[in-house]
Amino acid sequence: MTMTVCLCRLPALLEARKAGLRVTLHGGEVPGRSEEAMQQLAFHPDRLGHMCYMEDRVKEALLASKIPLELCLTSNIKTQTFPCFQDHHFQEVFLAKHPLVLCTDDSGVFHTSLSQEFAIAMNTFGIQEKDVQRLVAESIDYTFASDAEKLELKRCLLPRLSQI
Ligand SMILES: [Zn+2]
């Protein structure tokens, strides 16, 4: 379940959690919504998306939370959240060693692929192949798959990554 949250949806989110669903919340895509971002963090979703606009208190809360953050480079450019890839907060989150998952947001809408997003990250921020391998391995840990499925994903994907 992925959605941008407002407080009016909190009962539904709590119900979803009670039913055993994992929750991703996307937010911080427009400026001036720090209170909403703090509420999203207080809900402590399994994953967060975007969080492009963060006042210091939001940034501190996010980094302290260790909630994996989905970053969608092309999406944030095409929606004009950032003027260019160089200005994207990927680098800041990456250097802070915060759990992050490179995503496409919606590959059909934003006409991108995960491979393209990694290529952009490598070309823009200079991340290396070993960083890509680590990010992919950690991303598997942050999926909503079962432990057995995560093991299978790692068994299938990680040997291929070491060949790039
Ligand atoms: Zn989104």
Image (tube, rainbow, N blue to C red):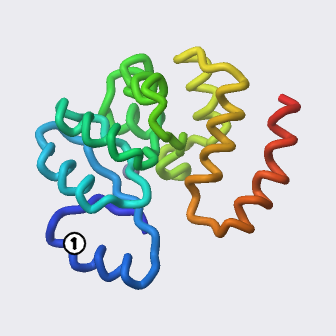
Q: Residue at x 32, y 59 (%)?
A: 44
Q: Is residue 123 shown above or below 45?
A: above
- Quarter of the picture holding the C terminus: top right
Q: What amino acid is found at the position of numbered circle 1 in the picture?
A: Leu
Is 12 placed left or right of 2 in the picture?
left
Q: Which residue is drawn at 18% across and 63% down?
A: 6
- Circle 1 SS class: helix
Q: Which residue is drawn at 72% across and 25% down?
A: 130
The front one of 86 and 101 is 101
Residue 117 spot, x, y in % from top left: 58, 34
Residue 118 spot, x, y in % from top left: 62, 32
Which residue is under mark 1? 10
Q: Is residue 24 shown above or below 162?
A: below
The front one of 11 and 4 is 11
Q: Residue at x 87, y 42 (%)?
A: 159
Residue 43 lies in quadrant: bottom left
Q: Is residue 58 shown above or below 157?
A: above
Is 114 placed left or right of 95 in the picture?
right
The front one of 93 and 89 is 93
